Amino acid sequence: MAKDFREYLVEVSRHEDFGRVFKEIAVGNKVLLSFQASNIHGCYPEDTLDDVYAYTKWEVSMRATKPAIDVPKAGAWDFLKHNYWAKPFDKPDFQRAMAAENVPTKHCQQILEDVIEYAMLKGQLESEDDIRLIGQDEEVKEYTKKATMGCGGCGGQKTIEKKAD
């Protein structure tokens, strides 16, 4: 069982009118989860509380680097959409993420665990210790480069093989 998703939450900003924002949780080098709760989010209670354990429902979104999370037969959503917690998720117009409001805390924990399972099955994550946090100003591409450093793709592997001969 993964550690409690709330242990990953790191606040990056708080504003009276714009609510509070937590960093995204990068699970492997593809899927990013966002668990949010404040006076402007679809959560319960709909307030900005200092104690994240006081929330019983959360606003959750998940997105992916490449391919996009909902690309049929290639995106992570194809693997995740069959879970009991997936029904309220939708992809709002002009957004890149699958999102849902008022997701119960126990479902949030299961979402994290299912995304970890997906990333491990796909070879994108070796252990939960490799999970990273991504801030608002950080580029996902930077994270992806760090996570895949040293991999030249299929062409790079051929080059390495030629040099070894």
Image (spheres, helix red, strand yellow):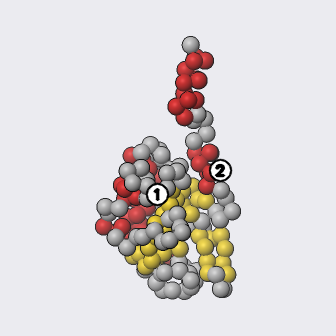
Is 148 situated left or right of 71 in this image? Answer: right
Q: Residue 51 carries which label?
A: none
Q: Quadrant of the C terminus?
A: top right
Q: Which residue lies furthest to the top in this view?
A: 165
**Within 10 Å of the Cα at label 1, are there few (<14), some (14-19), or many (20+) other Cα atoms?**
many
Q: Which amino acid does label 2 sit on?
A: Glu
Quarter residue 163 falls in = top right
Q: Tell me what residue is drawn at x 43 percent, y 55 percent.
A: 71
**Secondary structure at numbered mark 2:** helix
Q: Tell me what residue is drawn at x 54 percent, y 69 percent.
A: 94
**Residue 99 visible, this orientation:** yes
Q: Which residue lies furthest to the front in this view?
A: 93
Q: Circle 2 is placed at which residue position?
A: 142
User: Which tag is nearer the camera, tag 1 or tag 2?
Assistant: 1
Residue 15 percent coordinates (x, y): 67, 81
**Secondary structure at numbered mark 1:** loop
Q: Tell me what residue is drawn at x 42 percent, y 70 percent.
A: 90
Q: Tell me what residue is drawn at x 49 percent, y 51 percent.
A: 67
Residue 66 percent coordinates (x, y): 52, 51
Is 154 situated left or right of 72 in this image? Answer: right
Q: Which amino acid does label 1 sit on?
A: Ile
Q: In this view, does 88 lie above or below 112?
A: below
Q: Circle 1 is placed at which residue position?
A: 69
Q: How far apart are marks 1 and 2 (CA)?
A: 18 Å
> Which of the two discs, 1 and 2, labels the residue nearer the N terminus?
1
Is 28 situated left or right of 134 in this image? Answer: left
Q: Quadrant of the N terminus?
A: bottom left
**Within 10 Å of the Cα at label 2, are there few (<14), some (14-19), or many (20+) other Cα atoms?**
few
**Residue 34 visible, this orientation:** no
Residue 2 percent coordinates (x, y): 42, 58
Residue 5 percent coordinates (x, y): 47, 65
Q: Which of 90 and 21 is in front in this view?
A: 90
